[in-house]
Image: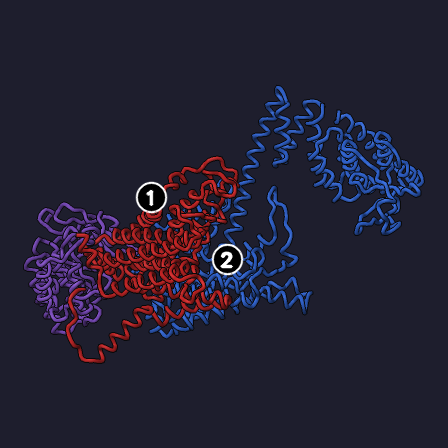
Chain colours: A purple, B red, C blue
């Protein structure tokens, strides 16, 4: 597949930290509307890849294209977010001193300029949209609670809700079910599948049951490069993947 | 649009704040001007100018709270903006003296005659006009803050690094203003003011006028801060304070928000300085001392950061304590001030206001809720 | 005319001195006292003859008498016309015999005396005569001074004496100065161009500011080839001067840098390694300085012979005092504030105020005198550089402390634990390291180093309660500029800032230079928020 038909296209991306090669000629491409799971052992470069896509880390070399036109390697986080790439972090980082409602409000797509926000008034349409999102992530009941008081699972959902409110074209979801109970995990899988109906999604996850639950194409990262791609069943038969996961 | 913005700032604390502020100010004004001196009801002019000074400090504290409490930028250099506003006003008051100086030069202030300067430096031009000086009171600190902030926030200098370079900024300015060649009176600064807008600075009525002007400025500064922090922009600021990188990933340019609030805060500090100078009668480079700027932070911390009214309350309380204790036990004051820094950070992280809010919440929590909390304010 | 008069006095005087010097000059004591007494009532012309006679007498007392004459201390008693040297003691005069130097009388009133007056012309002549006389003194110190003063005056009339003195001189250093003085005198004389060329070469070798002014003056009057040579010499000397000037700036810069390094090195531990922002750091330096004061106070009163060892005794004590206070601060305040840097900043600032006021209450607000041991006072000359021993010791000391600290961090178990805890507190704890203990020890170490820095800084700075405040901003600048968590960075940062400051000073003045350096750092931090030697990586970003 070439860059023209991909919503996200990484080509020979390299990143190193003080001699440690975090990404090693990584190439990857995501089709519009696709949901892709990224798996790999610790230190495989999953989070660094997310950092590169969202502008947090600049690649040493390589191309990162969004919709074939925007070179993400040259843009900063804000510009990339404005383009329509949303990211959920591994550790929930919602705004603790704001209510659930305000967290969603801040994420809602609207003018991001200083003066626009100074004179902004929450419209009825925005309130409706907040209702909608809260309903999807099942947090209607705690709408006016400070988000700091939510449970861990609720915080993860709030993060996903904020992604939804942002209405990005591409969602990057980093370990959404870390620390969740089983029922929360399957609930989250359902939530993500629902979201994937209208968005392109990249999910990074350790939990194999969860990935199986998502039932999507999988890319396996190892030492900063993609070593296998395909359905979960297909990649788990790959010699190389078995070697990486089980060791020699 | 602006009307809505301002209405957004009026909540219960605003009303309490404004009522207390104007109640006390007008009370003091009336008790100073009304009863004859000597009567038991009479309040001395000393009280008037001390209160006036406190109010300018309160405004300064609000400006610091705006950046620290709402945006997480701990400025250890706000004294610089305060002093710059003060110098702008001081320059006007120097020009007002005219030929009444010791050397009787109608154009040059005494210190320039003393240094044998022949003509007014270019940056003193225009300060004979009050409107120009008043504009500079806001523009000079604002421009400096904008330039400094533009560099600092864009390159993402945060936390203690930012605090340290704000401290270096005010320190550098202090060193610079100590020099005679700078043209701001060097060591001695600007003093011996005679009158303001034609009113003698020695008269009680002018003093009361300045007190009321300070109260009005404080009220306006408070309301602007209140309106800004209650708007959606205020929510973004708090988001930036709590998780700056998260706001970037949501598409907000955190540096622009910081820059805007930083510059606004510097302008407010400048106004506070401008009102401070005619009431104390002098401005000199020691106002730039880093220790002064850190002291402002403790006013805010004691009152309660992120509450605006608390910052003002803290400024008045600490300075009241300072006036009392430096008079009674001068040796003791630094122990008290130092102790406050330690105790407040350890035991009262949300300040006095936060302490009472906590108490109230605990009291509420111990009783069954009577109604759901109202949405918004 | 003036010159003529001068040479009229000097030339015969000097030749006679030389002549006498080859004999032994003990005889004719009577003749000498007659010559002295002959000054009574002499007019200026007669006096010149008498001065000449005295100078050529070869008597050792001639010099003090002429000196007394030149500064108006030579009188005669009205009663017996005896010449005396008078010293003023409480409005009265003490009279000394000019020939023996013994005290003749005390408490003589002015009315009984008459001054032997000299005019300006005579005074100038006296000075030149005295200078030439001392060129041949038996004391090398005096000869050196005389040679230097002849270099300054550059009197052509002194040429013969100089030449004679050069022949006689055995001390090579003094001979060099004599040659240089000789060169100056030649340039001022009517000697041949070849002589003058040689003189230029000698002055070029000297190559300092004085040589430059002499050569520049000579270049103004010279003509033809000589003029070209003079101009060339001026350029060469100017270049030499520039080099020395740069060397001097570097030395001053290193010296300032070593002070900055000393002040910042403890901070590099507490702030750089631990990430704790300690605004009371300067007060630890101050405590070290006051410990030195206390140690010296005790030594002065009880064991003055130990004074030269006072700093060596103060070092461990200062480390313990400041380190102890540091541990107390860490255990009492800072450990509750880990992870809240801004609050730590405020709390430690408060502590700094308390410490300052405590010291002020105990020792008073004024400066305390800390003495300098013998081995640290004085200076030596390195080319055109004057290097004071105390600055040199401080530079060496700063480097030693730095190296010792690096070794400690790198090669001792304590250093290993410190690095482990700062890099991954949880992991270190899980491996059985008592992180609390390590925190306290690290903070104590940083504070203790600040204390021993105080011992060194007490030698060059005022020991007052405000001592620490003057260093706090500079130390933070050094650590931040050099790169947090990197001791090499602190070293390079301190030296760079020190040297930059000293190179800016000639153009901008001391205060403005400092302002420029501050502005530079403010801008630099914008460009490289993590300092010169920044660590890179994912761990750093969070």
In the rendered view of the protein, which quadrant contains the N terminus of chain C? top right
The foreground one among A217 and C153 is C153
Whether residue B169 is situated above or below residue B334 in the rendered picture: above
Q: Which mark is residue C233?
A: none
Q: Residues within 10 Å of mark 2 (few under 14, many from 20)?
A: many
Q: Residue furthest left?
A: A197
Which chain's residue wears label 2? C
Q: Is residue C126 above or below residue C299?
A: above
Mark closer to the observer (1, 2): 1
Against C132, residue A114 (above or below) is: below
| Left or right side of C361 for A235 | left
Per the rendering, the mark at residue C262 is: 2
Q: Is residue B237 left or right of residue B137?
A: left
Name the secondary structure under disc 1.
Answer: helix
Q: Quadrant of residue C539?
A: bottom left
Q: Looking at this view, is C347 or C79 the one in front? A: C79
Mark 1–mark 2 distance (CA, rounded to whole Å): 50 Å
Identify the secondary structure beneath mark 2: helix
Residues A14 and C71: in front is: C71
Q: Position of residue B224 (x, y in %)?
A: 26, 55
Residue in view at x 75 percent, y 27 percent:
C2
Q: Left or right: B16 with respect to B140?
A: left
Q: Residue furthest top?
A: C224
Drawn side of residue B10 relative to residue C528, left or right:
left
Residue receiving disc 1: B131
């Amino acid at each position: 597949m070439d860059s023209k038909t991909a919503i996200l296209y990484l080509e020979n991306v390299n990143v190193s930290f003080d001699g440690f090669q975090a990404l090693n000629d990584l190439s990857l491409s995501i089709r519009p509307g696709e949901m892709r799971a990224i798996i790999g052992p610790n230190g495989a470069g999953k989070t660094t890849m997310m950092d590169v896509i969202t502008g947090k880390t600049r690649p040493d070399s390589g191309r990162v294209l969004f919709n074939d036109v925007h070179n993400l390697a040259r843009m900063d986080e804000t510009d990339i977010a404005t383009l329509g790439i949303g990211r959920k972090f591994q550790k929930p980082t919602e705004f603790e001193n704001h209510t659930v409602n305000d967290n969603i409000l801040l994420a809602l797509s609207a003018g991001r300029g200083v003066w626009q926000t100074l004179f902004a008034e929450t419209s009825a349409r925005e309130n409706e949209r907040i209702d909608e999102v809260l309903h999807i992530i099942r947090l209607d009941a705690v709408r006016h609670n400070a988000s700091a008081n939510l449970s861990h699972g609720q915080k993860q959902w709030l993060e996903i809700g904020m992604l939804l409110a942002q209405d990005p074209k591409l969602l990057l979801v980093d370990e959404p079910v870390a620390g969740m109970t089983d029922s929360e995990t399957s609930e989250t899988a359902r939530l993500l599948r629902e979201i994937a109906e209208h968005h392109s999604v990249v999910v990074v996850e350790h939990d194999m049951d969860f990935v199986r639950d998502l039932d999507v194409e999988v890319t396996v990262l190892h030492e900063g490069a993609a070593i296998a791609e395909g359905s979960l069943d297909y990649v788990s038969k790959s010699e190389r993947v078995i070697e990486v996961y089980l060791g020699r | 649009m602006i009307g809505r913005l301002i209405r957004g700032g009026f909540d219960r604390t605003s009303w309490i704040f404004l009522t207390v502020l104007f109640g006390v100010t007008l009370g003091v004004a009336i008790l100073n001007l009304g009863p004859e001196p000597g009567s038991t009801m009479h309040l001395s002019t000393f009280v008037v100018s001390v209160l006036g000074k406190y109010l300018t400090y309160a405004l300064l504290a609000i400006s610091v709270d705006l950046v620290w409490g709402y945006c997480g930028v701990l400025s250890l250099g706000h004294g610089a903006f305060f002093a710059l506003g003060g110098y702008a006003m001081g320059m006007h008051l120097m020009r007002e003296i005219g030929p009444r100086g010791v050397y009787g030069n109608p154009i040059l202030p005494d210190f320039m005659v003393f240094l044998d300067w022949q003509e007014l430096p270019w940056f003193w031009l225009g300060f004979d006009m009050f409107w120009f000086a008043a504009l500079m009171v806001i523009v000079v600190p604002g421009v400096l803050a904008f330039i400094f902030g533009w560099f600092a926030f864009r390159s993402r200098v945060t936390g203690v690094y930012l605090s340290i370079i704000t401290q270096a900024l005010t320190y550098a300015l202090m060193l610079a203003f100590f020099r005679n060649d700078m043209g701001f009176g060097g060591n001695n600064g600007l003093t011996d003011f005679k009158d303001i807008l034609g009113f003698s600075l020695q008269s009680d009525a002018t003093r009361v006028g300045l007190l009321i002007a300070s109260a009005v400025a404080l009220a306006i500064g408070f309301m602007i801060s209140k309106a800004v922090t209650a708007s959606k922009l205020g929510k973004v600021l708090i988001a930036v304070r709590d998780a700056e990188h998260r706001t970037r990933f949501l598409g907000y340019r955190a540096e622009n928000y910081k820059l805007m609030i930083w510059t606004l805060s510097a302008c407010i500090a400048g106004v506070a300085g401008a009102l401070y100078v005619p009431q104390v009668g002098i401005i000199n480079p020691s106002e730039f001392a880093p220790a002064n700027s850190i002291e402002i932070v403790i006013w805010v911390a004691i009152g309660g950061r992120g509450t605006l009214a608390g910052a003002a309350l803290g400024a008045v309380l600490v300075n009241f304590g300072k006036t009392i204790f430096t008079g009674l036990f001068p040796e003791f004051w630094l122990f008290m001030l130092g102790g406050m820094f330690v105790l407040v950070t350890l035991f009262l992280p949300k300040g006095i206001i936060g302490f009472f809010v906590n108490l109230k919440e605990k009291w509420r929590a111990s009783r069954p809720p009577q109604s759901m909390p109202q949405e918004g304010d | 005319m003036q010159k003529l008069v001068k040479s009229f006095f000097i030339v015969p005087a000097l030749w006679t001195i030389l002549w006498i010097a080859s004999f032994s000059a003990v005889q004719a004591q009577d003749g000498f006292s007659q010559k002295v007494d002959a000054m009574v009532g002499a007019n200026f012309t007669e006096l010149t003859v008498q001065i000449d006679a005295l100078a050529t007498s070869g008597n050792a007392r001639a010099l003090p008498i002429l000196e007394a004459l030149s500064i108006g201390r030579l009188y005669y008693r009205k009663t017996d016309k005896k010449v005396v040297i008078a010293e003023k003691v409480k409005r009265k005069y003490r009279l000394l015999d000019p020939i023996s130097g013994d005290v003749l009388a005390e408490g003589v009133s002015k009315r009984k005396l008459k001054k032997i007056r000299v005019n300006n012309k005579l005074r100038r002549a006296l000075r030149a005569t005295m200078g030439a006389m001392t060129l041949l003194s038996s004391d090398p110190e005096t000869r050196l001074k005389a040679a230097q003063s002849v270099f300054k005056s550059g009197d052509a009339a002194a040429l013969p004496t100089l030449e004679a003195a050069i022949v006689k001189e055995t001390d090579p250093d003094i001979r060099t100065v004599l040659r240089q003085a000789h060169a100056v005198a030649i340039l001022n004389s009517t000697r041949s161009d070849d002589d003058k060329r040689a003189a230029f070469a000698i002055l070029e070798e000297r190559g300092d500011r004085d040589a430059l002014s002499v050569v520049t003056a000579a270049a103004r009057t010279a003509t033809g080839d000589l003029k070209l040579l003079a101009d060339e010499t001026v350029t060469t000397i100017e270049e030499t001067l520039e080099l020395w000037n740069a060397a001097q700036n570097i030395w001053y810069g290193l010296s300032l840098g070593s002070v900055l390094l000393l002040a910042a090195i403890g901070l590099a531990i507490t702030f750089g390694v631990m990430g704790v922002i300690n605004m009371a750091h300067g007060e630890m330096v101050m405590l070290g300085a006051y410990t030195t004061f206390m140690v010296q106070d005790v030594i002065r009163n009880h064991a003055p012979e130990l004074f030269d060892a006072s700093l060596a005794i103060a070092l461990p004590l200062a480390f313990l005092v400041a380190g102890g206070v540091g541990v107390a601060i860490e255990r009492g305040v800072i450990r509750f504030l880990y992870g809240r840097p801004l609050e730590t900043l405020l709390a430690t600032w408060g502590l700094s105020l308390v410490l300052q006021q405590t010291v002020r209450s105990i020792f008073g607000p004024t400066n305390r005198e800390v003495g300098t041991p013998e081995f640290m006072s004085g200076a030596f000359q390195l080319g055109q550089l004057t290097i004071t021993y105390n600055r040199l010791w401080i530079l060496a000391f700063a480097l030693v402390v730095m190296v010792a600290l690096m070794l400690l961090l790198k090669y001792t178990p304590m250093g290993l634990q410190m690095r482990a805890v700062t890099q991954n507190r949880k992991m270190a704890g899980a491996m059985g390291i008592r992180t609390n203990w390590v925190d306290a020890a690290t903070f104590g170490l940083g504070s203790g180093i600040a204390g021993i820095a105080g011992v060194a800084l007490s030698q060059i700075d005022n020991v007052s309660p405000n001592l620490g405040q003057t260093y706090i901003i500079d130390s933070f600048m050094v650590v931040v500029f050099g790169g947090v968590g990197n001791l090499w960075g602190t070293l390079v940062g301190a030296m760079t800032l020190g040297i930059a400051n000293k190179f800016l000073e000639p153009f901008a003045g001391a205060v403005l230079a400092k302002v420029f350096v501050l502005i530079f750092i403010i801008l630099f931090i914008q460009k490289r928020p993590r300092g010169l030697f920044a660590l890179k990586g994912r761990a750093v970003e969070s």
